[in-house]
Image (cartoon, rainbow, N blue to C red):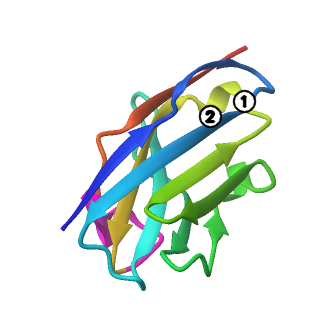
Amino acid sequence: QARLVESGGGLVQTGGSLRLSCFASGAIIHNSNIGWFRQAPGKERELVATMIWTGESTYYTDAVKGRFTISRDKNTVYLQMNSLKPEDTAVYYCAVGYDEKYTVSGYRDWGQGTQVTVSS
């Protein structure tokens, strides 16, 4: 089982940038899926970006395409977020999974989340 710890959240103005980090330890299989999800108050948790641990097959939800970038360096997975908007405000989670990569249920191990707040 993987242990995931997110960091890097905070308060930023509209148009600003943040880089989230997710340090992964424990059992990680190289063909696992790594996902960044977010959950805003009163809304369901949604996929933001995902890739295979090796860095292949990146995917972004339409709302963040061209603004967010998922990447990995050794055991840390990053989510670079540029041109932030108030609607990006949410708790962001990283997760590791081995099943269907586009849904919450496909991920087994989750971090505790980090809050991102974008002010207008």
Q: Is disc 2 placed on a helix, strand or loop?
A: helix
Q: Position of residue 94 (x, y in %)?
A: 41, 52
Q: Front-most of 74 and 95?
A: 74
Residue at 61 percent of width and 62 percent of height: 71
Q: Left or right: 110 with respect to 68?
A: left
Residue at 46 percent of width and 51 percent of height: 37
Q: Left or right: 38 with respect to 72?
A: left
Q: Position of residue 40 (x, y in %)?
A: 46, 33
Q: Front-most of 109 and 24?
A: 24
**Residue designated by label 2:** 88
Does 25 lie within the magenta span?
Answer: no
Q: Position of residue 10 (x, y in %)?
A: 54, 22
Residue at 36 percent of width and 38 percent of height: 113
Q: Is disc 1 placed on a helix, strand or loop?
A: loop
Q: Which residues are magenta?
A: 100-109
Q: Quadrant of residue 73?
A: bottom right
Q: Front-most of 108 and 7?
A: 7
Residue type at numbered disc 2 = Asp
> Which residue occupies the extreme front position in the image?
74
The quarter of the rendered structure image containing the C terminus is top right
> Which residue occupies the extreme left position in the image?
1
**Residue designated by label 1:** 85
Residue type at numbered disc 1 = Lys
Please rate how many residues cluster around mark 2, counting C-alpha atoms within 10 Å: few if below 14, some from 14 to 19, many from 20: many
